[in-house]
Amino acid sequence: MRTQSLAHVIGDIDFPQAPDVSASPRPWIALPISYRAISPTVAAFDAAWVFLIGIGSGLAYDAIAHTNGNLSTYVGSAIAIAALFSAFAQSADLYRPSNLLQIWRQIRRAATTWIMAFACAAAIAFVLKIGAMFSRGATLTFFCGGFLCLVGFRVALARMLASIIATGALARKRVALVGMVDHLKENGSVAAMERYGYSILNTFALPETGGSATGLKHAIAGRMREVITYAQSANIDEIILVLPWSDTNLVDEVVAALTVLPIPVKLMPDVAISRLLARPLYELGPTKVVEIQRAPLGPIQRRLKQALDQCVAAACLFLLFPLFGVVALAIRLETPGPAFFLQSRVGFNGRRFRIFKFRTMSAMDDGAVVRQAQRNDLRVTGLGRLLRKLSIDELPQLLNVLRGDMSLVGPRPHALAHDDEYDRLINTYAMRRKMKPGITGWAQVNGCRGETPDVGSMRRRIDHDIWYIEYWSVWLDIRILLMTFVQVMRPKDVY
């Protein structure tokens, strides 16, 4: 016996409605591909256009520069870049349909992948000593022309896919839903199925009461017989189960009843599980694990940032060594005491280290009470005022960067006394220790410098630090370093 629709079974309950695809203008002819075919189709298209751009850019350069290039060389380089780009793009999840719909994220990842493909090709050419075979002009034309095409294609692709999905032009998979009333009502994925190539032909609500445990079991068994009868008579492709994952007995019972059918049966995550499965999934030996919290930087990103820190710090120390000697001598001549000031700070993952600074005060507090520098602070020496204004007193921290305690860019470290105080007052304060502290940071270039007279000013600084940790990139570090240089030329709120 064919069941009634969900609305007839449970009455007038307002369920989340799937987008009204029929309200959008449908194309005259539906596309002969499904939602799952989007990824391989786009991957094949990428390989094709990269190959054609590689050959076309080489021939165009020959025509403009009046040179006679080797067509076979252009074909070889085009195949190599197309293969490398496709491999890197696949590993970066560029072809996942949900990622293809996000324009700016897609552009950023695709641009990085494009650069990596050319860098890898250059490294291979260097190792094999075949660099002389390739024209630098033709290669540069290939890189720049392909980069522009890449951005344009990504924007056009995202908009085209959004339009295709919205109009329901994809080949649709015919499914039946089986689930509990509450889960059918609350699960947002049910409402979104129509948008992503599924056509819901019928919905079966399982009974939740049956007088007794035995009665309920018989009622569920009767409903499952209805599902099986419908599946055998209707032309459906899949059965989707919308059941609570915590009720394993119910899941096992429903799955066991459906084993007689020769069609796929899939279990949709419930609301609680969906939040977890939205996170990355990894293999851990014989099992799989969900990444609840990721490290701010991956292994490659961490090494890249460290390499940038080490190279820049070493170069700066080499160039500034004479300045260090002059400043240290001037400090010793002005007031008695050491030229350098060392203070304990908390760094990456809560580890303590000693920070290096040029001494600019008559006091050198490093205990349970550390008073911040204030405007017209009498503890600041005459030379120290100039050093602080030009941020020269911070330059010895390049030694901390070279030692690995600090980074060029990151959340600024505070004295231990201030760390303890703000750790109690601001619950997100400790999150800034997910990355190495920096000589400069996103908070500093956005005006959060100098004294923090109230908790609100420190909260603003912490918010900037957390944003930096979440959105770190090499380009962001370079941008902050350039902004820091500009701010040093125009000092403000430094005393």
Image: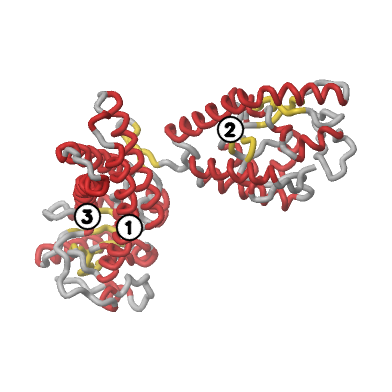
Q: Quadrant of residue 224?
A: bottom left
User: What quarter of the picture does the N terminus occupy?
Assistant: bottom left
Residue at 29% over, 34% down:
121
Q: Secondary structure at mark 1?
A: helix
Residue extending farthest to the right is: 378
The residue where tag 3 is placed is 36
Q: Amino acid at mark 2?
A: Ser
Residue 418 is marked as none
Dot placed on the residue nearer the N-terminal end, 2 or 3? 3
Count the marks: how many? 3
The residue where tag 1 is placed is 152
In this view, the residue in front, 186 or 198, is 198
Q: Amino acid at mark 1?
A: Gly
Front tag of 1 and 2: 1
Q: Amino acid at mark 3?
A: Arg
Q: Callout 3 environment at 10 Å: few (<14), some (14 to 19), or many (20+)?
A: few
- Specify whether 403 is left or right of 334: left
Q: Tell me where residue 159 appears, x and y as whole percent.
A: 32, 64
Front tag of 2 and 3: 2
Above or below, comparing residue 428 to residue 135 in the picture: below
Q: Quadrant of residue 391?
A: top right
Q: Secondary structure at mark 3?
A: helix
Is residue 332 visible in this depiction of the protein? yes
The residue where tag 2 is placed is 407
Q: Callout 1 environment at 10 Å: few (<14), some (14 to 19), or many (20+)?
A: few
Instruction: Tell me the colour scheme of the image.
Output: secondary structure
